[in-house]
Image (tube, rainbow, N blue to C red):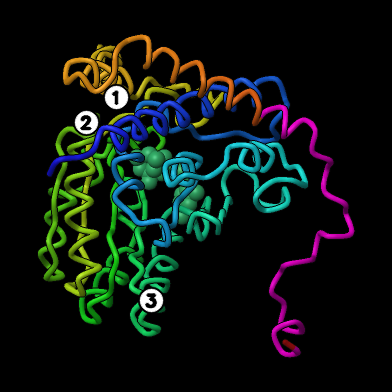
Amino acid sequence: MTIPNDFLLEMQRRMLRIRYFDERASKMVKRGEIPGTVHTSIGQEAQVVGATMALEEGDYMTGNHRSHGHPIGKGAKLGPLMAELAGKAWGVCQGKGGSMHLADFKVGSLGESGIVGSSIPIATGAALSSKVLGLNKVSLAFFGDGAANQGCLYEAMNLSSVWGLPIVFLCENNQYALSTPSRTVTAGVVAERAHGFEMPGVRVEDGQDVLAVYDAVRAAVDRARAGNGPSLVEVVTYRFNEHSEGLRLAVDYRNAGEKEAWLKRDPVKIFRNHLLEQGVADAATLDALEAEVLAEVEAAVEFANESPDPDPSVAFKDLYTETQGATA
Ligand SMILES: Cc1ncc(C[n+]2csc(CCOP(=O)(O)OP(=O)(O)O)c2C)c(N)n1
Ligand SMILES: [Mg+2]
């Protein structure tokens, strides 16, 4: 598949946005400018952008606790996302969601949740609505290797296969669930579990290569849109930071030298080199792109700082309650 140069540069732009946004969010958490903690996608940018850019603008997706990158990859504005992390009124959820419960409907991001695995059935429901209403929208569920062992994934895969739903199940296999190595709790290969549900299962071995991820997810998205049902795509990647920012674990759960080896496979640097080697852009253009994205992230922080805190009177607004549902 030949991909136009402007699309390739947009891939690099979005990977940079995720990298700089998450680096900045990490600093803000440590300074107390963002409450709680954040989980970054630093190191996983190729997997996030390869998947989100394989979707069309109107398509749906759901995420998890590590999900700032998903709306960014799908083209979301950074300011309202940063304001949401800071719990401010101009945030995508008016500051009520925070880092782990973002939703940005403008880019089809239906929601994210701190309960591991819980957004998978929501993506499946969205795919069902697309099919029933004839919307021709594909739904994509992002989840981790830890969530791959939650039962709700298999309930969702089963019914989506039986009903031929337009959904892609996307396992972000960063090889750890918090401090638990995937190999110690996962039988077999996640992608191969697809076969039990009569759907294709593909494993992208090099999840640091944005084009490899894009090709695999694009095939699954096209298949879903053509009415041929769901797929499971597993992408092998690695998170460069701790599970969450500021977390100090007593155990050193990574193998000796492992992180250092993965740091050499930085997806942002790999793709920069690819763009240079292929003559898509020269170094000055790519340097300018990096400076532009850095400035964009700083502007997002300013937007968050300028935003007021949410007014306590809106605390129960936009919530579904039985009373509201009954009278609606
Ligand atoms: C149902 C549930 N069990 C446990 C937790 C605690 N927890 C939060 S994140 C996490 C690890 C998730 O690992 P994975 O799905 O691989 O995603 P990753 O953090 O690696 O991106 C765990 C166990 C939780 N939030 N929800
Ligand atoms: Mg994981």
Front in this rendered view, residue 26 or 149: 26
Mark 3 or 1, nearer chain start? 3
Split into quadrants, the picture shows ligand 2 in the one at top left
Residue 99 location, x and y as percent?
59, 42
Does the CB distance between marks 2 and 1 fall below 8 Å?
Answer: yes
Say which element carries label 1: helix
Q: Is residue 247 above or below residue 327?
A: above
Name the image quarter holding residue 98: top right
Identify the mark at residue 243; answer none if there is no mark.
Answer: none
Residue 169 location, x and y as percent?
28, 58
Q: Is residue 261 above or below residue 154?
A: above
- The residue furthest bottom is 326
Residue 313 location, x and y as percent?
89, 59
Identify the mark at residue 209; answer none if there is no mark.
Answer: 2
Left or right of 261 on screen, residue 319: right
Q: Where does label 3 land, which residue?
A: 135
Left or right of 157 on screen, residue 72: right
Identify residue type, mark 3.
Leu
Q: Which residues are magenta?
A: 301-327
Identify the mark at residue 267; answer none if there is no mark.
Answer: 1
Mark 2 or 1, nearer chain start? 2
